[in-house]
Amino acid sequence: MFVMSKDIRKITLDAICAHLKRAGQSKRDFGVTHMGDPYFVYRLEKRTTDPRLSTIQKAWDAVSR
């Protein structure tokens, strides 16, 4: 099993938080709208999940729109 680097997680989380601030969107709304998971950002913050690289890419695709 691949273990997610904390640096990738932190950089992704920072990018998501910046996007949320710009878009005026909640963490839950981001998760529902872009990730299909209302708790995605919360679990990323709490480090209770190791998302796949494809999931990280999906998050980056959402914040770069």
Image (cartoon, helix red, strand yellow):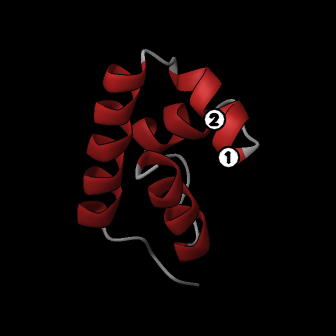
Name the one closer to the observer, 14 or 22.
Answer: 22
Which percent across, then down, holds residue 59?
52, 54
Name the one closer to the observer, 15 or 53.
Answer: 15
Which percent across, then down, holds residue 30?
58, 31
Q: Quadrant of the N terminus?
A: bottom right
Task: Report the number of numbered marks.
Answer: 2
In the picture as drawn, the residue positioned furthest to the front comes out as: 65
What amino acid is labelled 1 in the image? Met
Which percent across, then down, holds residue 49?
56, 53
Please tell me whether residue 5 is drawn above or below residue 30 in the rendered image: below
Name the one closer to the observer, 45 or 18.
Answer: 18
Q: Name which residue lies at 52% across and 50% down.
A: 62
Q: Give the quadrant of residue 23.
A: top left
Please tell me whether residue 60 is drawn above or below residue 43 in the rendered image: below
Q: Residues within 10 Å of mark 1 (few under 14, many from 20)?
A: some
Please tell me whether residue 31 is drawn above or below residue 5 in the rendered image: above
Q: Name which residue lies at 34% across and 53% down.
A: 12
